[in-house]
Image (cartoon, rainbow, N blue to C red):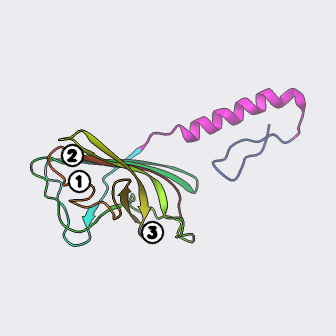
Amino acid sequence: MSGTTTNFSWPFPTNGDVADVAVDMAALAAAADSTLGDAWTAYTPVWTGTTTNPVIGTGTIKGRYKRLGKWGMVQGLIVTDGTTTYGTGTYLLSLPAGWSFENTATALVIRGSAFVFDTSTTTSYVGYALYVSATTFAIRTHAATTNFSPTVPVTLATTDQFGFSILAELQ
């Protein structure tokens, strides 16, 4: 086997010899696993409100991402606590620093899945991550006709949670 692809420098066969197929495929699988198996990188999503920004206090806000060529996966979780203030307006969340959504198809606004969990009633609100700008997104749930805010789909309180998982083509 000789040669490499332009993405990830993965090996590719050059002679098409049937006897080499198993070896060639094993080398390609090992290269793909090595590339895709890299560890996630931690990041802290920026959580803002369109009118007044929320403050996490001693709650938890965490995220992670993995870039695979021009594609990226991002996940995040926010858990409120007694020191969290919820701000006003609809909420926006940020992509990792230096990332931006490919935005030539802004009509395709759904960028991933999301949820809001009300711990007082143990109710989950499923939803989606919604494109807002090249570097920010909002959450919309099945129970609301507007984006996620301090009172939509539920009035947020201590230990409530929300999170997201996004797969997107990046610029």
Main SS of residues in magenta: helix
**117 vs 97: above or below:** above
**Helix, strand or loop at disc 1?**
loop
In which quadrant of the rendered image does the C terminus lie? bottom right
Disc 3 marks a residue whose amino acid type is Ala
Residue 58 included in the magenta stretch of the image: no
Residue identifier under label 1: 154
Mark 1 or 2: in front is 1
**Helix, strand or loop at disc 2?**
loop
Residue identifier under label 2: 160
* Mark 2 nearby-residue class (10 Å; few <14, some 14–19, many ≥20): some
Mark 3 or 2: in front is 2
In which quadrant of the rendered image does the N terminus lie? top right
Residues at discs 3 and 2 in contact (Cβ within 8 Å): no
Q: CA distance from mark 1 to mark 3?
A: 27 Å
Return the x and y of residue 62 as percentages of the image width and height: 29, 47
* Mark 3 nearby-residue class (10 Å; few <14, some 14–19, many ≥20): some
